[in-house]
Image (cartoon, helix red, strand yellow):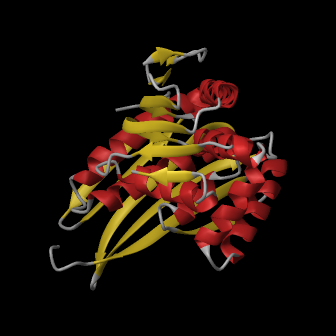
Amino acid sequence: MSLGGGPGVEARAAGTDAYFELAFSPCLNLVSVVRRFVNEFYSQVLIDADVTSRLALATHELLENSAKYAADDLTSIRISVSKEAGSTLVAITTRNRAETEHIARLKATLDELIAAPDPQAHYLVLMRRTAKRTDGSGLGLGRVRAESEMNIAYEVDETSVTLRAEARIPETPAQ
Amino acid sequence: MTPIDVTPIETTELQATAQLDEARTTINVSFRGNADARAIAPVDAFLVSVHEAAARLGVQEVVVDFHAFDFMNSSCFKAFVTWIGRIEELAPPRQYKIRFLQDSGKHWQRRSLDALRSFAAELVSIQ
């Protein structure tokens, strides 16, 4: 499988762990294709349809973010599900190169997001703010934190951005 | 149902329609499909038209059916936030309510619609 001329995709499910990694040419039209694949892939791995939905939403928002601001023709995404004692760790990591100006703006957005103690309250602040914005919604990463209930961390250098969203899902007796 | 002057969205990925009910008190809107980055401009324009029709006709409520709505990205979600903001700008007697009909099997809807209800609890309800 190859998407958009990118290097390709690797997926593996071993025991209770599974990961999916894709590198592709950033193209907004492909983001929904990847989200649908992620939804299908992880519905086979995760019992909880709500968790799968959260993962799919976060995948879509993080990939759109990467695709919008990528400085070259390569964006990569890795989604992993790992069983831990009493919980399951789900994580999404995206990497792409970006222009310095975009990196500075993203860093400011993420620093504010991560510092906000209440994801839901901060999301409402972003929603109030978005009506006045003309350059994008400014909601995507806040949505990942509030609606997908995932913590966000990042690493940046002068030319590249790595974003990681993760959540620990407690095991339920049904699992 | 009476057609109103709102151009429907008819793309491969997304369809949306708006009709006035017979009592002329409610506009029924339905979304079907997937609203991603390609749908931002159509969704924006559609909701602007729905709002203008609702204000012009003086309806009490707009019912938005999400049962066949598979996904909405944050930019299209913004269009709904902006729509609610436009209602808030109307004089209180002219403000109308929005009632969303959700599909509980589409889990993203509960989270996104809860956020919209938290944003404007006096205007938004979910069924």
Determine which quarter of the picture holds residue B68: top left
- Residue projecting furthest to the bottom: A85
Left-right relation of A163 to B67: right
- Foreground residue, A27 or A151? A151
Residue at position x 66%, y 26% in the image: B41
- Foreground residue, B110 or B60? B60
In the rendered image, residue A121, in percent from the top left (x then y), is placed at 64, 71
Could you tell me if residue A29 is visible in this image? Answer: yes
- Residue projecting furthest to the right: A101
Say above or below: B22 vs A135: above
- Foreground residue, B107 or A148? B107
Residue at position x 63%, y 59% in the image: B119
Residue at position x 21%, y 53% in the image: A44
- Foreground residue, A18 or B105? B105
Count of labels shown?
Answer: 0
Say above or below: B81 vs B28: below
Left-right relation of A3 to B78: left
In the rendered image, residue B67, in percent from the top left (x then y), is placed at 35, 38
In the rendered image, residue A163, in percent from the top left (x then y), is placed at 59, 60
**Quadrant showing the N terminus of chain A:** top left
Residue at position x 41%, y 58% in the image: A54
Left-right relation of A125 to A1: right
**Quadrant showing the C terminus of chain A:** bottom left
- Residue projecting furthest to the left: A174
In the rendered image, residue A41, in percent from the top left (x then y), is placed at 28, 48
Determine which quarter of the picture holds residue A55: bottom left
